[in-house]
Structures are given as C-alpha cells and as structure tokens.
Image (cartoon, rainbow, N blue to C red):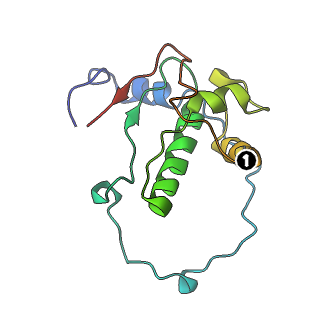
Amino acid sequence: MSMNQFSDWTSEEFLSYVNKGFIIPDKIQRSKSKITRASLLLPDKVDWRTSNNVIGDIKDQGKCGSCWAFSANGVMESYISILTGIMPDLSEQNLVDCVYNRDGCQGGSFNDAFNYTQNKNGLNSQTTYPYVSGSKAKVYNY
C-alpha cells in the first residue's frame, strides 16, 4: 500500500466511488455442473498474491460506473491465467459498450458480463479495444 489519489478520502467516499454502477442481479444463474470438494484435489489454502501471474494490475474505472465490468474481467483474467499460465488483459470497454441489457457507465452486473462473454466466445483485449469511458482509465502497477 502506498499514497495514491484515494488516500485523503473517507471510507464512504471511496466506497461510493468504487461501487458506482454495481447492480445486484434479480436472479443469479447457477451453473448446471456440480463440482464437489471430494471430486477435486485442492490444497487447504492458497495465497494468490504470491502465485505467479494470477492477479492482474490494479485498474481505475474513472468516472464511469463500470465496476461490474472491471470485477468480471478480473475474475476471467485470473481464471484464464490459472488454466493457461498466460495473463490476458481483457477489454472492460467491450463489456461497457456491448452488454445488451445494461447502460454501460450507469451500472451493470458481473453475471451479465459473464453471460455476454460466454455467448460471444470471449472478449477483445485491452490492446484492440481500450478503455475510454469515464476519462481514460489508469493502470497502477504495484
């Protein structure tokens, strides 16, 4: 942790900024597949912070209520990295512009982002479809 643009904000100010745009879905679609702990060989605990290439860079949504797109992409990027060893940089702007039943910067649901990505067989990368909503997003490398 270090000093940044949020250091002098109250907890309430920070939460209202980072949660801007998050909409709780009326109904969450559950996966049809059943995975039980007994069927998996999992360690008792994992510290993902020390795992190589599993957690992406910190990103800033700017003044756009697109936290739903950033949170969904963070999950998908980490999942892909765990499976392949390659950390993608997926396009939040792709979701903000194209998730059909949401209004981009006015909010959304990570569930809708997952469904959109699955239905379209993936997302563009940050390189081919950069984030521009809410002024230019900044990436902080820590």
Q: Position of residue 14 (x, y in %)?
A: 40, 27
Residue at position x 53%, y 24% in the image: 130
Task: Give the residue type that dot 1 points to.
Answer: Asn
Q: Position of residue 21 (x, y in %)?
A: 60, 28
Write down the quadrant of residue 90 in the picture.
top right
Dividing the image into 4 quarters, which one contains the N terminus? top left
- 52 and 1: which one is in front? 52
Q: Is residue 93 left or right of residue 18?
A: right
| Residue for badge 1 | 115
Q: Residue at x 29, y 34 (%)?
A: 141
Q: Is residue 77 left or right of residue 59?
A: right
Residue 134 point in image, percent of width and height:
53, 15
**Kind of element beneath mark 1:** helix
Between 36 and 74, which is closer to the camera in this rendering?
74
Above or below residue 13? Residue 121 is below
Q: Nearer the viewer, residue 29 or 83?
A: 83
Is 135 placed above or below 86 here? above
x%, y% of residue 61? 49, 25
Q: Is residue 127 above or below residue 111?
A: above
On-image quarter of the C terminus: top left
Question: Residue most toward the front?
Answer: 128
Which residue is rendered at x = 55% and y = 49% of the image? 76
What is the quadrant of residue 73 in the picture? Answer: top right
Query: What crowding class fits label 1: few (fewer than 14 Cα within 10 Å), some (14-19), or many (20 or more)?
Result: few
